[in-house]
Image (spheres, rainbow, N blue to C red):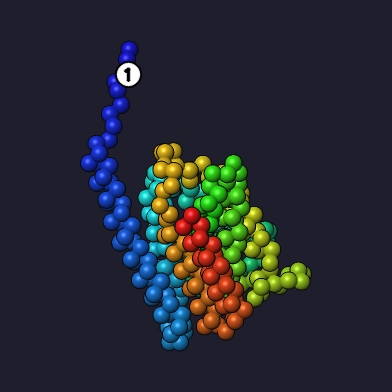
Amino acid sequence: MKRPPMTALPSNQINLDSQVLNVCFVVVTVMSVLSCLLLLWALVSPESMATRRGWPESLALLSLTAATLLGASRHLPVQNIALAAVLIGVTGAGVHGLSAATAVPFGPVTYTLRFGPKVLDIFSWAMPFLWIIAVLNSRGVARLILRPWRKLKNYGLWLIAMTAVLVMIFDFALEPFATLVSEFWLWQPTKLPWAWHGMPLVNSFAWLGLTVLILSFTTPALIGKKQRPSKSPPDYFPLGVWLGCVVMFGIGAWTGGLWTAVAFSCAAAIVVTVFAVQGARW
């Protein structure tokens, strides 16, 4: 018995779906920009600093997550992005919960209620979304930086390594703002001799290692099956999100007088932008 031939989706339906996705992406991107501007106003306004309870950060976090997922869905099937997002969010948040209970691998940390309720009274609800933003956009920036070498045999391994480094830089910029300015979580003293504004350095290296682990089983979902042109146009959106987050962390550190954190955020933003733009122009 012969199977009936599979019917392809009409081209007008494909175009309609693509147009709807692009419209949603633009709308959500505008919303995320507005929410980030609102957060910046809340950071530099002394009156709002005394009364806000994390809702500007929550709004920016959710809108940036939605924009990140929609931006990635322009290049990959929605189900692939959904699967990758679930794996990234659940794994990252789960390990943070483990660390809050056992101090392994990130270090002894206590999550406060300044960012809203805690999951199982252990870790902040925001951690899955924070991991999605950090990993997916860092991977997009890494693709820009490594664009001249994308034909190399070991390109995939270099992409994972570069993404992990960018996630570690992202966390290094985040921690002073999240702990000393907004007090979303608090680090307990350790016996380790080195710390970054109270954060044990093992935390950022744990972010790097966990990113490598996450990408080792999410990368298949992030690889497109369709044949792309040999030289497709670069996508600067992940760079915009990554850069915007690091700049906001730096501004937050500035409001708290954390000048070394401000200097690090500025230097990271400049260096990463230069390498990403140079790679994209190749």
Above-or-below relation of 48 to 3: below
Residue 86 placement, left or right of 18: right
Residue 143 placement, left or right of 59: right
The residue lying at 64 percent from left, 54 percent from top is: 209
Position of residue 161 measured from the top left corner of the image (x, y, whole percent): 61, 53
Any part of residue 108 in sight? yes
| Residue type of the residue flagged with mark 1 | Arg
Quarter of the view holding residue 171 = bottom right
The residue lying at 25 percent from left, 39 percent from top is: 11
Any part of residue 171 in sight? no
Quarter of the view holding residue 170 = bottom right
Quadrant in which the N terminus is drawn: top left
The residue lying at 48 percent from left, 67 percent from top is: 243
Q: Which residue is at the far bottom?
A: 46
Q: Secondary structure at mark 1?
A: loop
Q: Which residue is at the far top?
A: 1
- Give 52 or 271, whichever is nearer the viewer: 271
Position of residue 219 measured from the top left corner of the image (x, y, whole percent): 53, 45
Q: Residues within 10 Å of mark 1 (few under 14, many from 20)?
A: few
Q: Which residue is at the far front?
A: 282
The residue identified by callout 1 is 3
Position of residue 106 measured from the top left corner of the image (x, y, whole percent): 65, 61
Residue 7 placement, left or right of 177: left
Position of residue 103 measured from the top left corner of the image (x, y, whole percent): 68, 62
Marker count (numbered): 1
Quarter of the view holding residue 191 = bottom right
- Give 61 or 239, whichever is nearer the viewer: 239
- Give 231 or 128, whichever is nearer the viewer: 231
The residue lying at 64 percent from left, 63 percent from top is: 204
